[in-house]
């Protein structure tokens, strides 16, 4: 594989008051807030871009999230749909910025999600070249890894077809193949393994195992609690943009699953105001 490693100390800092340097940590978040502006019409959005509207509504997707991850640690983000897991992943990867708070990321980050951010009008081959070029690979380095990516994706003749003709599973296959062959320091996996057949998912999990053995830092966003139990060192439970708790899979998974079952039986009104208490659900659902 091509050697594309940059100098070891790579940092991306988003902070008004920089966090204390802790070289043991690959990722540090402190009091991260993310607000999204809500517009009723497209016209309102244009007005909001031209001048500041004090009466514009906002939605708080993340509410003072604080945690850190050590180099080589695999941490899972778990929560109901819309809880804020993917927003955290997007902030860590640099896709979006926090509204408030301090962020420090040490290392090269690659984010893999089901949509994978590829150019729909380009072919699979062209997307491989495009994504590697913007990551700083030379043409020689791309040629060195191209066939490995094609073999791993295993989508046959479709590799020469525009990505807009791909199924979601095929997009996920190609996106995962590219992501794991650029050897990032930090890999963010956002529900990418939920798309596609089980044989490919098994191949992906084997690759994640290799990353763990190499002491890579992994952020794992998923609803697949069995997989998270096997791979994650710690789990962070997010609900309505807030942290419910952080702990080992044994401390978090069962309480979360119990809460999720209860949530499914609640009315919409009950769901709006519910903020689970970790200790309560641990006492209720954790059994030795």
Image: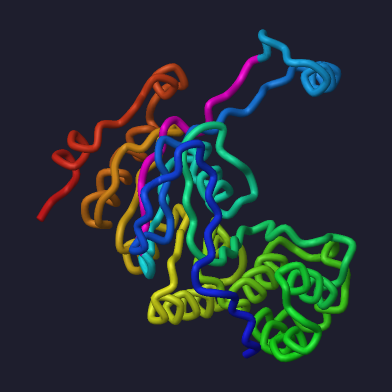
Q: Position of residue 263 (x, y in %)?
A: 38, 32
The residue at the point 13 percent across, 51 percent down is 287
Question: Is residue 58 on the magenta stretch?
Answer: yes
Q: Is residue 158 left or right of 145 when viewed as pictured?
A: right
Give the image location of residue 152, x and y in percent.
Answer: 64, 83
| Residue 152 in sight here | yes
Q: Depth check: 216 or 117 in front?
A: 216
Vertically, is 230 above or below 55? below
Q: Is residue 54 above or below residue 261?
A: above
Q: Quadrant of residue 123?
A: bottom right
Residue 181 appears at what percent x and percent y? Answer: 61, 79
Give, as a single range, the part of the protein colored magenta.
57-70
Name above or below for residue 101 compared with residue 252. above
Q: What residue appears at the point 72 percent right and 12 percent down from the top-left corner?
A: 53
Residue at 19% over, 44% down: 285
Residue nearest the viewer, comparing 242 with 96 = 96
Q: Position of residue 191 (x, y in %)?
A: 54, 57
Which residue occupies 67% across, 68% down? Answer: 175
In the displayed structure image, the side of residue 286 where residue 167 appears, left or right: right
Q: Is residue 281 magenta?
A: no
């Amino acid at each position: 594989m091509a050697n594309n490693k940059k100098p070891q100390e790579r940092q991306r800092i988003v902070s008004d008051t920089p966090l204390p340097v802790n070289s043991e940590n690959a990722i540090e978040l402190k009091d991260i807030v993310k607000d999204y502006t809500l517009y009723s019409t497209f016209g309102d959005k244009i007005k909001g871009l031209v001048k500041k509207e004090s009466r514009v509504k906002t939605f708080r997707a993340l509410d003072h999230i604080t945690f850190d991850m050590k180099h080589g640690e695999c941490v899972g983000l778990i929560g109901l749909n819309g809880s804020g897991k993917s927003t955290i992943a997007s902030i860590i990867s640099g896709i979006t910025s926090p509204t408030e708070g301090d962020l420090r990321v040490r290392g090269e980050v690659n984010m893999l999600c089901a949509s994978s951010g590829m150019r729909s009008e380009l072919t699979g081959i062209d997307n491989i070249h495009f994504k590697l070029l913007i990551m700083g690979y030379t043409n020689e380095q791309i040629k060195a890894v191209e066939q490995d990516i094609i073999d791993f994706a295993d989508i046959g003749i479709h590799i020469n077809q525009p990505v807009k003709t791909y199924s979601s599973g095929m997009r996920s296959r190609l996106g995962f193949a590219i992501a794991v062959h650029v050897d990032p320091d930090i890999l963010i996996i956002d529900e990418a393994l939920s798309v596609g057949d089980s044989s490919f998912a098994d191949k992906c999990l084997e690759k994640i195992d290799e990353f763990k053995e190499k002491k890579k830092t992994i952020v794992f966003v998923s609803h697949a609690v069995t997989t998270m139990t096997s791979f994650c060192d710690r789990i962070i439970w997010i609900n309505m943009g807030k942290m419910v708790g952080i702990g080992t899979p044994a401390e978090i998974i069962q309480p979360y699953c119990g809460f999720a079952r209860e949530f499914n039986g609640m009315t919409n009104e009950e769901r709006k105001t519910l903020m689970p208490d970790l200790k309560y659900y641990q006492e209720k659902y954790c059994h030795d």
